[in-house]
């Protein structure tokens, strides 16, 4: 018998939702590319939609903190297609 504490189960549910959301995004991305929409247009639109939703649900201050954290991750190279580890 599997004994999961409430928070463990909640974490698993969130992880599963994130996986499914990623699959939805990948499908939508592929559809957009297939329809001739450039990747940079898809990316900018996705980011604008995401930021709008985050501001609506969490407020501007919290989203600005998130964007600062994302900026640091970009600066550290986390999102590069090919990363070099030094």
Image: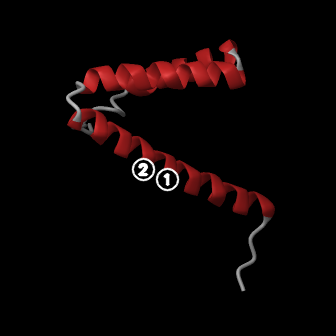
Query: Which residue ends up furthest to the right in the rendered image?
Result: 6
On screen, residue 33 versus residue 17, left or right, reads left
Count of numbered badges drawn on the protein:
2
Dot 1 falls on a residue whose secondary structure is helix
Nearer the viewer's eye, disc 1 or disc 2?
2
According to the image, what is the colour scheme of the structure? Answer: secondary structure
Mark 2 neighbour class, 10 Å CA radius: few under 14, some 14 to 19, many 20 or more: few
On screen, residue 5 above or below 68: below
Q: Which residue is found at the position 33% from the left and 37% from the top?
A: 29
Provide the residue designation for mark 2: 23
Task: Examine the rendering and report whether any part of residue 38 can be seen.
Answer: yes
**Split into 4 quadrants, where in the image is the N terminus?**
bottom right
Provide the residue designation for mark 1: 19
Circle number at residue 57: none
**Split into 4 quadrants, where in the image is the C terminus?**
top left
Task: Examine the rendering and report whether any part of residue 75 can be seen.
Answer: no
| Cα distance between the residues tagged 1 and 2 | 6 Å
Residue 39 lies in quadrant: top left
- Give percent across and percent down for residue 43: 35, 25
- Give percent across and percent down for residue 57: 70, 25
Q: Which residue is found at the position 42% from the left and 41% from the top?
A: 25
On screen, residue 78 versus residue 51, left or right, reads left
CB under 8 Å between discs 1 and 2: yes
């Amino acid at each position: 018998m599997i004994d999961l504490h409430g928070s463990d189960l909640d974490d698993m549910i969130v992880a599963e939702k994130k996986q499914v959301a990623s699959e939805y995004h990948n499908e939508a991305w592929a559809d957009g590319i297939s329809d001739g929409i450039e990747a940079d247009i898809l990316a900018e639109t996705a980011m604008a939609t995401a930021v709008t939703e985050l501001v609506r649900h969490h407020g501007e201050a919290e989203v600005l903190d998130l964007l600062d954290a994302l900026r640091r991750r970009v600066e550290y190279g986390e999102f590069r297609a090919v990363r070099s580890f030094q």
